[in-house]
Image (cartoon, rainbow, N blue to C red):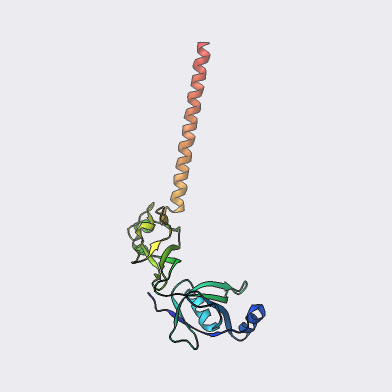
């Protein structure tokens, strides 16, 4: 696992819409620290730390730490609700869930695809068709995997990788267990698909012509007998 981010914060006295605006004008981002054995606490976090983590894709459900003034040590937390500015697309409010070694949560873990350069299907012009970019798992909050690697190095056109190939660490289970869902396939290139569609269309047309000819022959036989 990657080293956990540490976010420095301060208690926030001004709450509500007006208080949140004031906090943002002063260079902070409002948030709430909740869960565990403690009461919910309104906090404010340093904008530069939050924005950097968000821009680098790390402000998602993964283990982080909150440095709270007046408390011993750093509190392990999970970002749970990140509200974004409707225009700028940057965080304007962040909630953090207190966790410990006993906390287990449902979380999305990103999927990475490796060995694309040696995949027979991709070498032949196939297309990597990603069905899921992340997999939902039930995991210890302090041991959430950073990502799952899916090896496509031996996949050919028409092959698929399913949930059963995901290597799950100890204590981590899939949320969806009633089916072996698809994560990625190697699809045929569009040119090949077009040729196959044309061939199917020609076969269908020939079949229709044969059926029409047989029907016409039957009508002629019937007329001769009459």
Tell me if I can see residue 189 in this picture: yes
Q: What residue sits 64% from the left and 78% below the top?
A: 16
Q: What residue sits 56% from the left and 85% below the top?
A: 11
Q: Position of residue 139 (x, y in %)?
A: 40, 67
Residue in front for this viewpoint, 129 or 174? 174
Q: Position of residue 80 (x, y in %)?
A: 51, 71
Q: Position of residue 126 (x, y in %)?
A: 41, 56
Q: Quadrant of residue 176?
A: bottom left
Quadrant (top left, top right, bottom left, bottom right) of the N terminus = bottom left
Tell me if I can see residue 126 in this picture: no
Q: Quadrant of residue 87?
A: bottom right
Height in image: 201 above or below 61? above
Q: What residue sits 52% from the left and 80% below the top?
A: 50
Tell me if 22 is positioned left or right of 43 in this view.
right
Q: Quadrant of residue 108?
A: bottom left
Q: Position of residue 22 (x, y in %)?
A: 64, 84
Name the residue furthest top.
226
Residue in front for this viewpoint, 160 or 93? 93
Height in image: 91 above or below 192? below
Tag count: 0
Name the residue furthest right.
18
Q: What residue sits 44% from the left and 62% below the top?
A: 136
Tell me if 172 is positioned left or right of 82 in this view.
left
């Amino acid at each position: 696992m990657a080293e956990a981010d540490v976010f420095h914060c301060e208690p926030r006295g001004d709450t509500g819409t007006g208080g949140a605006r004031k906090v943002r004008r002063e260079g902070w981002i409002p948030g709430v620290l909740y869960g565990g054995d403690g009461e919910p606490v309104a906090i404010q976090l340093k904008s530069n730390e939050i924005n950097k983590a968000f821009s680098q894709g790390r402000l998602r459900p993964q283990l982080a730490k909150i440095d709270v003034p007046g408390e011993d040590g750093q509190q392990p937390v999970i970002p749970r609700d990140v509200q974004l500015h409707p225009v700028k697309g940057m965080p304007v409010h962040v909630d953090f869930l207190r966790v410990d070694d006993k906390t287990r949560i449902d979380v999305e873990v990103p999927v990475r695809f490796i060995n694309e350069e040696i995949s027979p299907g991709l070498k032949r012009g196939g297309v990597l068709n990603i069905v899921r970019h992340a997999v939902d798992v039930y995991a210890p909050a302090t041991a959430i995997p950073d990502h799952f690697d899916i090896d496509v190095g031996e996949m050919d056109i028409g092959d698929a990788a399913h949930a059963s190939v995901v290597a799950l660490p100890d204590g981590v289970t899939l949320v969806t267990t009633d089916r072996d869902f698809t994560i990625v396939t190697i699809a045929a290139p569009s040119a090949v698909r077009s040729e196959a569609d044309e061939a199917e269309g020609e076969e269908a047309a020939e079949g229709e012509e044969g059926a029409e000819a047989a029907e016409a022959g039957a009508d002629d036989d019937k007329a001769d007998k009459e």
